[in-house]
Image (cartoon, grey):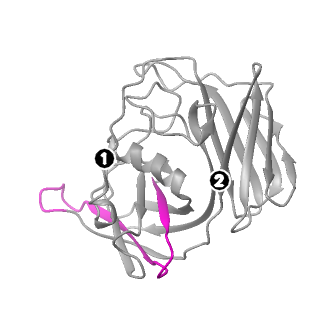
């Protein structure tokens, strides 16, 4: 992911967020700020934290890497996991997997400053399937829309993020939902976007993430801003971060699962 030509954002109007309050944000204009993109998931394998500097919104997607930082993640069980840089600006721990219910704290020290952020890894909610159906009547001939299907657990607060790829290219839209109106229900959410059109024969992959509330607010804010892409650009407006002291980006401990279909 890159920092948002953005900052990132999806565009969806779904029941799960239809009554969510719109967050009013001021426009960002500073360049050269530190951008942190930290992720810990439940799958055993490489975990990544990426550091870069943001660039003007009109620039091409080239984001200067931040090298030579000290990066580590600790958990609430007293374990500490140091990350190693390689390639430049990408800090990796391998192998490692996050554990449901544990709270993870990221620490990044660079250029004389130390940044921290915490995130709790939620319980996995199973992604049952993804499907394609005919798009609206005013869409191009044979165009398809993609939907995700899953059972939301009753009596538990859940937040979700979906990342979609069409023929291995990530769409610009960001999709974030909660269960305010779908608690305990079987959910059929359409991932509606205008970036890459989907047609029969296309390969569509969807990643489902179960995320904590703070990270949900981050992605929801980007979603409400419109179609934008992760990256290091100065944001039209900067979403609320869980990083302290405040800088651009986020740290997310989440579950992940992936399903792929060939559209018919």
The answer to whether residue 69 is above or below residue 206 is: above
Magenta stretch holds residue 177: no
**x%, y% of residue 111?**
75, 19
To which quarter of the image does residue 248 belong? Answer: top right
**x%, y% of residue 38?**
66, 44
Residue sitting at x 69%, y 54%: 40
Residue sitting at x 61%, y 66%: 122
The answer to whether residue 124 is above or below residue 87 is: below
**Mark 2 = which residue?**
119
Q: Nearer the viewer, residue 104 or 90?
A: 104
The answer to whether residue 165 is above or below residue 241 is: below
Q: CA distance from mark 1 to mark 2?
A: 23 Å
Can residue 189 be seen here? yes
Give the extent of the magenta segment. Answer: 136-165
Residue sitting at x 70%, y 64%: 42
Q: What crowding class fits label 1: few (fewer than 14 Cα within 10 Å), some (14-19), or many (20 or more)?
A: few
Magenta stretch holds residue 152: yes
Upstream in sequence: badge 1 or badge 2: 1
Q: Secondary structure at mark 1?
A: loop
**x%, y% of residue 5?**
43, 31
Q: Is residue 30 left or right of residue 74?
A: left
**x%, y% of residue 30?**
48, 17
**Mark 1 = which residue?**
22
Q: Quadrant of the C terminus?
A: bottom left
Residue sitting at x 57%, y 17%: 32
Q: Nearer the viewer, residue 94 or 168?
A: 94
């Amino acid at each position: 992911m890159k920092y948002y030509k953005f900052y990132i954002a999806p565009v969806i109007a779904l029941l799960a967020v239809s009554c969510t309050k719109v967050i009013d944000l001021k426009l960002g204009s500073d360049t050269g700020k530190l951008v942190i993109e930290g992720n810990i998931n439940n799958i055993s394998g490489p975990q990544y934290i990426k550091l870069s500097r943001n660039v003007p919104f009109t620039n091409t997607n080239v984001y200067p890497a931040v090298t030579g930082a000290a990066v580590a993640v600790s958990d609430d069980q007293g374990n500490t996991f140091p990350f190693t840089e390689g390639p430049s600006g990408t800090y990796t721990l391998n192998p490692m997997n996050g554990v449901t219910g544990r709270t993870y704290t990221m620490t990044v020290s660079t250029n004389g400053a130390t940044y921290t952020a915490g995130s709790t890894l939620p319980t996995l909610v199973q992604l049952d399937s993804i499907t394609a159906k005919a798009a609206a009547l005013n869409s191009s001939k044979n165009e398809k829309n993609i939907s995700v299907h899953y059972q939301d657990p009753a009596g538990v607060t859940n937040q979700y993020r979906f990342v979609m790829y069409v023929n291995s290219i990530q769409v610009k839209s960001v999709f974030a939902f909660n269960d305010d109106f779908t608690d305990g229900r079987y959910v059929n959410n359409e991932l509606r976007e205008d970036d890459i059109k989907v047609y029969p024969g296309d390969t569509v992959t969807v990643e489902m993430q179960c995320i904590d509330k703070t990270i949900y607010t981050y992605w929801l804010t980007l979603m409400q801003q419109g179609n934008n892409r992760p990256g290091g650009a100065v944001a039209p407006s900067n979403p609320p971060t869980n990083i302290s002291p405040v800088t651009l980006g986020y740290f997310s401990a989440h579950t992940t699962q992936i399903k792929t279909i060939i559209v018919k």
